[in-house]
Image (cartoon, rainbow, N blue to C red):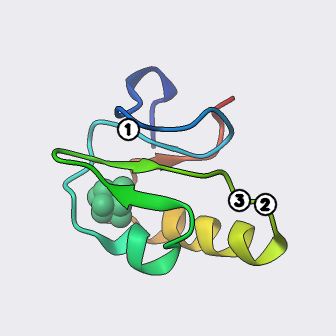
Amino acid sequence: MADKTRKTPGNVPGRYYVDEECILCGDCENRAPENFAMGETYAYVKKQPATPDEEEKCQEAMDSCPVTCIGNDGE
Ligand code: SF4
């Protein structure tokens, strides 16, 4: 389960975030390219979902992350 006290650099404020367990596999960016991006060491949320379609893709990215380091309980 993701830990909002360990957010990676670059996460914009809001519910979705990536934490430092990220292994930079790229899956979240493939699933939700409008919302996730790859940094040098970790992925991060570049934009919070603004439409039902983006919300669905972010949820899918969270559910699919191989190390469960995406959370949606941020602020
Ligand atoms: S799917 Fe998870 S491990 Fe892979 S890049 Fe995204 S946040 Fe990191």
Residue 67 seen from this side: no
The image quarter containing residue 52 is: bottom right
Instruction: Please identify the residue farthest to the right as the structure is shown.
Output: 52
Q: Position of residue 38 (x, y in %)?
A: 30, 57
Q: Looking at the image, which residue is at 45% across and 40% down?
A: 2
Question: SS class of the residue under badge 2?
Answer: loop
Indicate which disc residue 19 carries. Answer: 1
Q: Are marks 3 and 1 in contact (CB under 8 Å)?
A: no
Q: Looking at the image, which residue is at 56% across and 69% down?
A: 34
Q: Looking at the image, which residue is at 37% across and 38% down?
A: 19
Mark 3–mark 2 Cα distance, whole angstroms, equals 4 Å
Q: Are marks 3 and 2 in contact (CB under 8 Å)?
A: yes
Q: Position of residue 7 (x, y in %)?
A: 41, 30
For badge 3, the amino acid type reads Pro
Q: Is residue 23 left or right of residue 16?
A: left
Which residue, given by chain and number where applicable, does mark 2 sit on? 50
Instruction: Please identify the residue farthest to the top as the structure is shown.
Output: 5
Which residue, given by chain and number where applicable, does mark 3 sit on? 49
Q: Looking at the image, which residue is at 66% across and 37% down?
A: 73
Indicate which disc residue 72 carries. Answer: none
For badge 2, the amino acid type reads Ala
